[in-house]
Amino acid sequence: MLVYSHAQAEPDNTPSNEQSMDKRIQNLKMQVLELNRDLFQLEEELLFPANTQFTVFLSYDIGSFFSLDSVQLKVNEKVVANHLYTEREIKALKRGGTQKLYIGNLPSGEHELIAFFTGTGPKGRDYRRGSTVKLEKGSDPQFVELKITDNSRQQQPDFAIKVWE
C-alpha cells in the first residue's frame, strides 16, 4: 500500500516577497485607474459626439456681494440642470475653481440658454437673478461659462453668460 503525504508549502513572508507583492498591487491599481480614465473618455465621446456636444461651466469671482445657494439651467425652456451648493463647493469656486455644471447634446442651430442664480445678496437679502443668452450652435463642440462677479461700482453682483469661441 502506498501512502502519499503532502505537505502544504508555507507562504514565504520574507520582506522582499511582501515588497514584491505590494509593488504588483500598486501596478494593478495604476492599470485599473488608467483603464477607468480611458473608459470614461470613450463613454463621453460616444454619449456626447463632438458635433453635438454642449457644455456649461460655472465660475465665481470674488463674491463679496453675493453668496450662491443654487443654480438652475434651462436650454430651450427645458430644465437641464439644478445644483445646490455646499460650503465646500463655494470655497473651491472662490479660490478660482470652475464647475462643469452640464454636459449634453445640442443640435446645430439657434438656442436659448437661461440660468437662474439663487442666494443671499447685499445686506443679507434673499436674491434670485436670471441671465439669458441666445446662441448659435455650429457643428463644433460648444462651451458656455456662467460667470458670477462683483460690480463694485453698483455694490451688486453681476451674472454673465459667456459663449466661448
Image: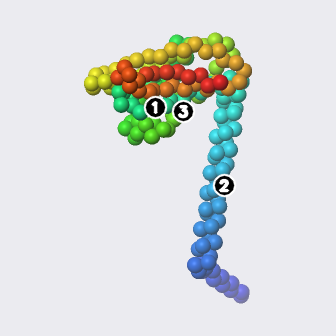
- Residue at left 35%, top 23%? 155
Q: Nearer the viewer, residue 144 or 50?
A: 144
Residues under labels 3 and 2: Cα distance?
A: 26 Å
- How crowded pointer 2 is (Cα within 10 Å; few <14, some 14-19, many 20+) is rated as few
Q: Could you say where residue 74 lies in the image, as x and y percent from the top left?
A: 51, 18
Report which residue position mark 3 lands on: 100
Q: Could you tell which of marks 1 and 3 lies nearer the N-terminus?
A: 1
Task: Mark 3 vs mark 2: give the one in front.
Answer: 3
Q: Which residue is mark 2?
A: 31
Residue 153 in the image, given as x and y percentages of width and height = 38, 22
Circle nearer the N terminus (3, 2): 2
Q: Which residue is mark 1?
A: 60
Q: What residue lies at 50% left-to-right and 29% top-to-bottom? A: 58
Tell me: 138 left or right of 164: right
The earlier-in-sequence mark between 1 and 2 is 2
- Quadrant of the rendered image containing residue 133: top right
Residue type at mark 1 is: Tyr
Q: Is residue 118 visible?
A: no
Q: What quarter of the picture does the C terminus occupy? A: top right
Residue 48 shows which numbered tag?
A: none
Q: Residue at x 48, y 38 (%)?
A: 96
